[in-house]
């Protein structure tokens, strides 16, 4: 029997308020939180983050921390500032079910709500899980049409609902108030893919976090929304060009199947668009094995799925943000430098003569067979050298994908990110605090560790 509109929305609210995440789900959440705090500490010094921080400090009053600084502000503006920093370098994690960067909205929203509520670390982890699960269910209902055909950026359009769920869970809202919070968030959701490659893309993450916290706080104070705000005739699903018109398939297995443990979260080990990562792993492996140099390369041909060219739109990037969405640049940098880090996307690297010489020799084309598997999980790279030698290699998933991330890799990434704002001694203490997150009685004890040393 089909689930009616009210029951579907109510079941989502019931899940958000009362679900008991599995220990394995909480551990996946802890990994995501550790990773995201690291990328916030790296992104906090970026121009887009600095602009938003200045506004947050000027306009906000409160006791929620802007991570990587000594500044405190209101919960909504702390979520905004930390969300922008989390996404500023495009080094934050990815989910191939929601087609969003989940943690850059979820973690700042949950942190701000937890600081306001003096919530414990375990509550932070549970809130992350329920927000993540909701985003995945919405991704299954709304995509591919919502993301691939209509230009919505799921990090914000779907992420706002996830952030609202996480904040509602931490505030302890009941089912009715949680339903209202989701309805408020549905009207606050936004984010256009046309702005990818600009400062607005990380702003999307900040807006998702801020709007999610705002929605939960307003619902807590009694603001109400339509019971059909999500899937009414003129609701969220309809307005945002959802693939499916109802929430039926979104709620059927909530609480019995955990997407976070099955498909999981993809941690990025390169600070570029996730659509570059399988090709980068493949190309770097090939370069290490065969030992060729940039001046030996005649052609680098990359085969990808059909969604990748819609994301990697900058063949000749002029800025660091554009370079993150450029297969020619990322491939050239992999060959020229043998690695990709945060500094790879500085403007002087983009104009490096070795990079500029190699860019025209990188091609990208769609291989329709790759569309039969998970989005952005397949790539094939062919390198032809000037002496006639040809190397081919295919990739299926990248390092950092679920099951392909070690604690050592995560710690190394966190340390490299945090060095942009903190000294090594402080980084070591912060990492140990994050490892003990579940036992922390008040999240404010955790956020105190993330200040400049």
Image (tube, rainbow, N blue to C red):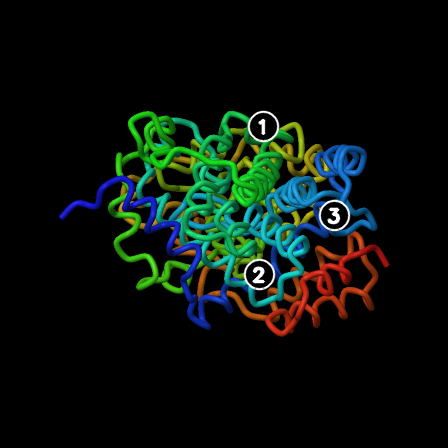
User: Crowding near pointer 3: few (<14 within 10 Å), some, many (20+)?
Assistant: many
**Residue 5 image-quadrant placement:** top left
Q: CA distance from mark 3 to mark 2?
A: 17 Å
Residue 380 appears in the rendering: no
Tell me the quarter of the image containing the C terminus. bottom right
Q: Which residue is mark 2?
A: 124
Residue at the spot 36% in from the left edge and 41% down from the top edge: 305
Which residue is tagged 3? 66
- x 43%, y 28%: residue: 151
In terms of sequence position, does the residue under pointer 1 or pointer 3 come before the other? 3
Disc assigned to residue 93: none
The image position of residue 133, as x and y in percent, is 41, 54
Question: Can you give x and y, in whole percent of width and height, for residue 30 in the image?
Answer: 56, 65
Answer with left or right where residue 382 lies relative to residue 7. right
Q: Relative to the observer, which residue lies in front, 327 or 5? A: 5
Residue furthest right as drawn: 453
Find residue 252 and report its horizontal and vertical position in percent.
26, 54
Residue at figure coordinates x 47%, y 47% from the top left = 162
Q: Is residue 78 placed above or below 268 in the rendered structure?
A: above
Q: Between disc 3 and disc 2, whose residue precedes?
A: 3
Q: Secondary structure at mark 3?
A: loop
């Amino acid at each position: 029997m089909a689930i009616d509109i009210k029951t579907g929305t109510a079941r989502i609210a019931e899940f958000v308020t009362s679900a008991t995440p599995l220990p394995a789900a909480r551990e996946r959440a802890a990994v995501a939180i550790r990773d995201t705090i690291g990328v916030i500490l790296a992104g906090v010094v970026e121009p887009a983050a600095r602009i938003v921080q200045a506004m947050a400090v000027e306009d906000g009053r409160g006791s929620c921390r802007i991570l990587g600084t000594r500044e405190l502000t209101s919960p909504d503006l702390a979520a905004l500032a930390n969300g922008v920093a989390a996404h500023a370098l495009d080094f934050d994690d990815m989910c191939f079910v929601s087609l969003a960067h989940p943690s850059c909205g979820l973690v700042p929203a949950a942190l701000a709500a937890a600081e306001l509520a003096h919530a414990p670390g375990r509550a932070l982890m549970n809130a992350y899980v329920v927000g993540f699960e909701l985003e995945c269910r919405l991704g299954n209902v709304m995509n591919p049409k919502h993301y691939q055909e209509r230009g919505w950026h799921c990090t914000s359009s779907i992420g706002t609902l996830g952030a609202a769920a996480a904040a509602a869970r931490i505030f302890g809202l009941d089912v009715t108030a949680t339903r209202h919070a989701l309805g408020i968030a549905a009207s606050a959701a936004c984010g256009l893919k046309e702005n990818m490659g600009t400062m607005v893309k990380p702003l999307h993450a900040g807006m998702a976090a801020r709007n999610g916290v705002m929605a939960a706080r307003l619902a807590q104070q009694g603001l109400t929304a339509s019971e059909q705000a999500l899937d009414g005739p003129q609701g969220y699903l309809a307005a945002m060009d959802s693939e499916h018109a109802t929430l039926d398939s979104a709620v059927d297995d909530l609480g019995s199947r955990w997407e976070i443990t099955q498909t999981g979260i993809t941690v990025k080990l390169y600070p570029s668009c996730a659509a570059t990562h399988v090709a980068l792993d493949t190309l770097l492996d090939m370069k290490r094995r065969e030992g060729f140099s940039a001046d030996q390369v005649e052609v680098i041909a990359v085969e990808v799925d059909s969604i990748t060219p819609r994301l990697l739109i900058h063949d000749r990037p002029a800025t660091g943000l554009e370079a993150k969405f450029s297969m020619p640049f990322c491939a050239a940098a992999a060959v020229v430098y043998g690695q990709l880090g945060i500094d790879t996307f500085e403007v002087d690297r983009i104009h490096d003569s070795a990079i500029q010489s190699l860019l025209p020799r990188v091609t990208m084309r769609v291989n329709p067979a790759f569309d039969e598997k998970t989005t952005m999980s397949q790539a094939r790279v062919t390198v032809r050298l000037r002496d006639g030698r040809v190397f081919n290699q295919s990739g299926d998933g990248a390092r950092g994908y679920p099951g392909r991330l070690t604690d050592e890799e995560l710690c190394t990434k966190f340390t490299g990110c945090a060095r942009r704002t903190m000294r090594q001694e402080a980084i070591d203490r912060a990492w140990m605090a994050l490892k003990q997150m579940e036992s922390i009685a008040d999240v404010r004890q955790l956020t105190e560790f993330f200040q400049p040393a």
